[in-house]
Amino acid sequence: MVSAESLNFDVLQIIFSHLSVPDLASVLQVNRSFLAGALPGLYRSLGFYRNQAKRYPGVMTPFAVVTAHLDLAYHVQNIDIRVIPNVRVKLKAVPDPRFLSDCAAALRASDFLKSFTCTVGSALPPLLPCIQSKPRLHTLRIDAFLTTEQTALLCQLRELQSVTLENASSAVMDALPKWAEALKSTLEHLTIHKSTYLNNTVLQKTVEHLLKLRGLHVIECLRVSHVDVLTATERTPLLENLAITITDTHANLPRTSLTALKHLALDLAPFSLPSDSPGRTVPSSLLSSLLSLTRFTHLASLALRLPEREPFPEPVIEDIMDMHGAHLRSLRFMGCIVDISSLEVIMESAERLERLAISVPADDINTFSPVLSISSNLHTLIDVTEHGTHGPKSSLTTEPVQMLMDDVPSLVHVVSGSRLWTSRPGSWGPEARLERMKSSRGTGLWFTPPPEGR
């Protein structure tokens, strides 16, 4: 019999890669072999999130741990900062200098850093010098409201494969075309989110350099229309992922080829529609016209965000299913209501659907659940109902989730807000168990493709 202690180091690492961080922390206390096998997984990703900030400075941050034990930096590949603890200086809240110092030291020591995320604008400037000379850094997501001098430092990063710029300043947008030219041999994914300084000239000059682009997401940049973005895609024959905000319901669509497209996100939220739109509604004809551009593609993922709990037009659902039902694996409806008859069309047509994000009617689960049971592949159901924003609504509880799992044998995960139910084998069939969400993770952007696999 082979003992755990005699297992090859590489085998231990493969086994431990399936464990959560708390489990890894327990495993490394078993013996020296387990310690060596668990450490890489435990320190591969460092993050700081809201739940940790609430306990700071009472609990040591992962950056402080690495700073105190610099040999651990050898394992660090991903750093994700979503919140910064503040201190009071002359009645003004400023980022905690000790925290920033620890972050900077950990960054400088992490020679094998692959991805860096910092969505707190005030924290980024002192950390920018620390991510220079990182040859393996390929993924960057930042709050990019930077000065001209800070932008010059940002543009020295020349090996990036994926760039996400949120709230980008005019200095960053002005420099973007030249930076894109420097990144033309490596950059494959570009996301620009909530920048009021992006305009069509900058967009076209940027994209013309990025012939290898596979992902383009331009969301809530109101000086750029969806027509501008679609026109830019004429230069990106390899484009697989596209996300756009609809800014004009009457604009003529360009003729563009999206034959390689696999994921599409359309943002039709109320801020993007003209103020004189009757009822702020989205015409079915506009949705159908946009979707017709993908007629000759095989979409595996589709995300749609509509204004203020509008009913999603059933004729458009039928168009989607006619064009993409045979290939869709993930479908997301944000801010809208999908009625039971439309849901039935989806379940009958999208036989390969594995992931569905939709507003789940907790008060009408008896009608909703049997329709979901039509599917034989649905693996994950995500409730996107925004409770409390449109009047009182019932939240999902274990009882209706248990009904869903009884009716849909393939269903493994149900997510509602910060709660996660997982189907576990029970004495009388599947049992819905409420588990703690991995709150240590930062939130992703709704319009990006879902994680690969289940």
Image (cartoon, helix red, strand yellow):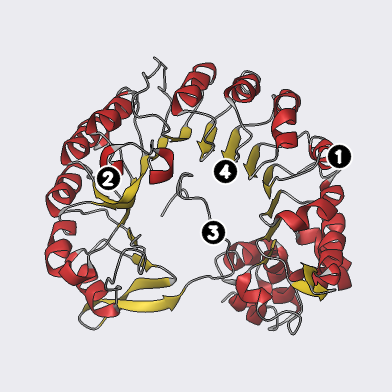
Q: Compared to 429, does 284 lie above or below?
A: above
Q: Amino acid at mark 2?
A: Arg
Tell which tag, 3 or 4, sits nearer the viewer.
4
Q: Is residue 125 above or below residue 151?
A: below
Q: Nearer the viewer, residue 331 or 276?
A: 276
Q: Dot 2 surroundings within 10 Å: few (below 14), some, or many (20 or more)? A: some
Quadrant where the N terminus lies?
Answer: bottom right
Give whichever of discs 3 and 4 has the lower sequence position.
4
| Mark earlier in primary sequence (3, 1) | 1
> How many angstroms separate mark 1 from mark 2 (CA)?
50 Å
Q: SS for tag 2?
A: loop
Foreground: disc 2 or disc 4? 4
Q: CA distance from mark 2 to mark 4?
A: 34 Å
| Disc marking residue 352 | 2
Residue 326 appears in which quarter of the rendering?
Answer: top left
Comparing 399 with 205, the one in front is 205
Picture disc at residue 443: 3
Q: Answer yes or no: do the residues labelled 2 and 4 have beta carbons within 8 Å?
A: no
Residue 339 x/y as whole percent: 17, 52
At 24% from the left and 75% from the top, the residue drawn is 402
Calculate the distance from the C-alpha at mark 4 to the C-alpha at mark 1. Answer: 22 Å
Q: Give SS at disc 4.
A: loop
Give the class, few, some or many, for how many residues have Cα within 10 Å of label 4's Cα (few <14, many ≥20): some
Amino acid found under the numbered disc labelled 4: Lys
Ranked by sequence position, the earlier of labels 2 and 4 is: 4
Determine whether, in the image, residue 123 is placed left or right of residue 130: left
Disc 3 marks a residue whose amino acid type is: Thr
Q: Quadrant of residue 105?
A: bottom right
Q: Which residue is mark 4?
A: 194
